[in-house]
Amino acid sequence: MKFAILVSEGPYTHQATDTAFLFAQAVLAKGHEIFRVFFYHDGVYNATRLTTPPQDDRNIVKRWTKLAEENNLDMVVCVAAAQRRGIVDDGEMKRNGKDATNLAEPFRISGLGQLIEAGIQADRLVVFGD
Amino acid sequence: MLHIINKSPYDRPALDSVLKTGEGAILLIEDGVYAAVKGGAVEAKIKTALGKFKIYALTPDIDARGIADRVIDGVTQVDYAGFVDLVAENKTSQSWL
């Protein structure tokens, strides 16, 4: 079965991201497919590669990127939410005249249409937020 | 329909809203698991609801909150694999945020 996951909260503030991650892991462990993970609102903070939690804490960003790399997941960050919160890739840096980028690989910045498409293409869409 | 509740019934009205919908399956996660505590103010509500709803609670969140020995009889505990199964079994899921 094809799953899509929507994450709308940032890391370390709410349990939502942790639940979403553990759910995604369980989906894959069960042999299902994840069509896309979409990060919206404060959820875009899951995608900054500059995060540096204490060594004895979980690294939520790294955990996502590792899962994505190992399973070839499509991890999409909402562009409007990212612009507001300063989540920047090369394209956004040039387009908006910024001097740095901070988007972790393999996240990609795209539009809300990607969420709608996920809702259509996947058999199930599960929302994690506050 | 799978109703996913992630907030305590002592914090948000999600549980009441779900019970008004009539029927289906309820999965309590995160602080939502506090609804499943024996002797809580919403215990009677949960017991009545068990007639119409199948009620599940996420074991890791129950364990994290130290309430494993006080879960209301009739509430079924599931792990993350069970969470995935519930989403797969139900055509739609609603996270009551």
Image: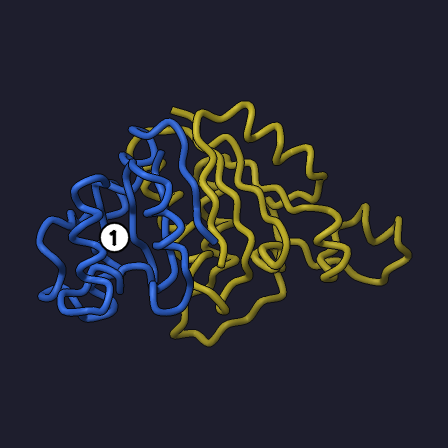
Chain colours: A yellow, B blue
Q: Position of residue B24 (x, y in %)?
A: 29, 36
In percent of the image, x 79 and y 49: which residue is there? Answer: A90
Amino acid at the residue labelled 1: Leu
Q: Nearer the viewer, residue A53 or A30?
A: A30
Rendering coords of residue A35 (x, y %):
50, 30
Quadrant that contains the N terminus of chain A = top left
Residue at figure coordinates x 64%, y 46% from the top left: A77
Residue A105 lies left or right of residue A102; in this view the side is left
Quarter-of-image position of residue A96: bottom right
Residue B40 in the figure: left or right of residue A63:
left
Q: Residues within 10 Å of mark 1 (few under 14, many from 20)?
A: many
Front residue (pair B41, B8): B41
Which residue is at a point 57% across and 42% down the rendered structure image?
A38
Image height check: is A82 above or below A110? below
Q: Measuring from the top left, give residue A45's x and y in whole percent.
A: 61, 60
Residue at horizontal 23 percent and vertical 41 percent from the top: B53
Q: Which residue corresponds to mark 1?
A: B58
Disc count in the image? 1
Percent x, y for residue A122? 49, 26
Q: Which image quadrant is residue A103 in?
A: bottom right
Apparent side of residue A93 relative to residue B87 in the rendered image (left or right): right
Residue A9, quarter of picture: bottom right
Above/below status of A109 relative to A97: above
Question: Which subunit holds the residue at mark 1?
Answer: B
Tell me the element at label 1. Answer: strand
